[in-house]
Amino acid sequence: LKSASMAASESARVLLAARDNGLAAQSLGVSLLRSRLGAFAISGGIVGFAGVLLAYQQHAVRVATFSPDASLNIFQSAVLGGLGHLSGPILGITLLQAVPRLFSLPSFLTALLTGPGPFVVVVLLPGGLTELLFNGRDAFLRRLAKREGIRVPALMGSRTGGAEARGGDLGGRRLRES
């Protein structure tokens, strides 16, 4: 919950700006070193808290508690679901763990899901399966907005320019049609 609330904060926008376009962020006064170290510290704190919860749940700290297989499963779930949104790793772990158990998939399908599955997703969908879901959602909303005659600049992406997205008005002057 705290991660979700942090994603909507000003600090998150600074981190996104530093990640997406470091030069532009620096021109706005953002220290890249400070923001990257802050992101590292925040992620370390979240992982440390997760470790404390695991130790509390297990009633002890043992080396065998967290095997290399568990580490690879977590990595695969993050890659498969996508890291661009908080729901990505949850979707990934659901596909890797719950789906084979709930639907009694044959072993060769489970092997395809955990073997080349994440590799194919990285090649075809760098943002993971959440990228596919969000692109589908946006396409549906674009069609719906077009059918209903609703103009939604946020759904138009880079297809419309800034002034055109605001109705073609530039400081009281209308733009001429090209």
Image: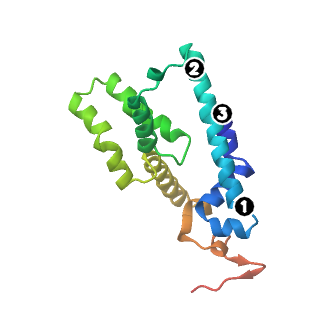
**Residue 49 position in % (x across, y down):** 63, 29
For the point 68% across and 60% down, the residue is: 32
Callout 3: 10 Å neighbours few (<14), some, many (20+)? few
For the point 57% across and 13% down, the residue is: 59
C-alpha distance separating marks 3 and 2: 21 Å
The total number of labels drawn is 3
Q: Residue furthest top?
A: 59
Callout 1: 10 Å neighbours few (<14), some, many (20+)? some
Callout 2: 10 Å neighbours few (<14), some, many (20+)? some
Q: Which residue was labeled with disc 3?
A: 1
C-alpha distance separating marks 1 and 3: 27 Å
Is residue 19 or residue 171 the one in the foreground? 19
**Residue 146 position in % (x across, y down):** 52, 60
Q: Which residue was labeled with disc 1?
A: 31
Q: Which residue was labeled with disc 2?
A: 55
For the point 47% across and 45% down, the residue is: 82
Secondary structure of the residue carrying tag 3 is loop
